[in-house]
Image (spheres, rainbow, N blue to C red):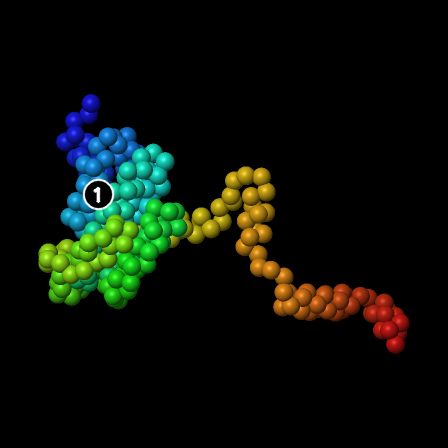
Amino acid sequence: MADPFEVRMRFSSQLQHLNASVNSAQKAAQYALKFKEMDEDLHSCILEQVERNNMNTRANIMYFIEHFLDLAKEGHADYVRMMSRDIIRVVDAVAPDDGSGAANVKVVRKVLQGLRDKGHLESQAVSQIDDVLREREINDDDLGLVSSPPTGDVNMVDGPPSQTTPRPAAKRPAPPPLDKRQIEQRIEEDRERHKRARESIWATPKGEDAEMNKLWEETSDFGDDDDRLLAEEAEDFAKEMAMQLCPHKRAAANGGRS
């Protein structure tokens, strides 16, 4: 059996070195699934790393969580349950209410929407968290260079995990602001993720007639506007064809109409 301390240290290191590449997320996710008998311990590693590292690493861990739960849903569903239970704690670390994580609010919102759409989180829980995020979403152009004074942390009220809402709790030190190198790294990683997202738009689904079915679902119903557009295009086409006739044929055509 693997040494629990060594497994924990290796997984923590993988979380610390996550980046925009899919490979880094897959490697860490597969490692956690490989040692799923230590699920509680490895889950606590995610919580610790998301609270201890800089805002770039916290954002990378947030993206990792979505990829991780996609694999865990089939490989070890207890990971999904534990993350659903502690999602408020993760959100508070990635986008704290002191303004230091304002640049991560969009990251958190995007990942939460993905987790909701895939059934990892309940819609009600995501909606409640989104209401809180609106209050934390300030100008993110500084990427955390300017932080407002700490106003207190956020904790959960008593209730089921799917219905927990943040509330003020004990204060804790704000994470350090990003330096120039970290800001450049964040910009580069965001650029890589946007590039990958654009590429996925053009991905062709697998299966017989899958592409045709996709186009069919994305095409709107035929309406009056479409009928009028077709009539206008037919009229323009007829005029264009008439202009391309030879002069004597054009005169003959005009004579025939007269």
Callout 1: few (<14), some (14-19), or many (20+) C-alpha neighbours within 10 Å? many
Asked which quadrant contains residue 255, the reply is: bottom right
Asked which quadrant contains residue 147, the reply is: bottom left
Name above or below for residue 30 compared with residue 107: above
User: Amino acid under label 1?
Assistant: Ile
**Is the C terminus in the top left, top right, bottom left or bottom right quadrant?**
bottom right
Expressed as whole percent of the image width and height from the top left, the position of residue 23 reads 33, 39
* The residue positioned farthest toward the bottom in the image shown: 258
Asked which quadrant contains residue 65, the reply is: top left
Image check: 174 left or right of 57? Answer: left
Expressed as whole percent of the image width and height from the top left, the position of residue 242 reads 78, 68
Expressed as whole percent of the image width and height from the top left, the position of residue 127 reads 32, 58
Residue at coordinates 60% horizontally, 60% vertically from top-left? 221
* The residue positioned farthest toward the front in the image shown: 159
**Is the N terminus in the top left, top right, bottom left or bottom right quadrant?**
top left
Expressed as whole percent of the image width and height from the top left, the position of residue 191 reads 34, 53
Is residue 172 in sight in this rendering?
A: yes
Q: Give the residue at mark 1.
A: 46
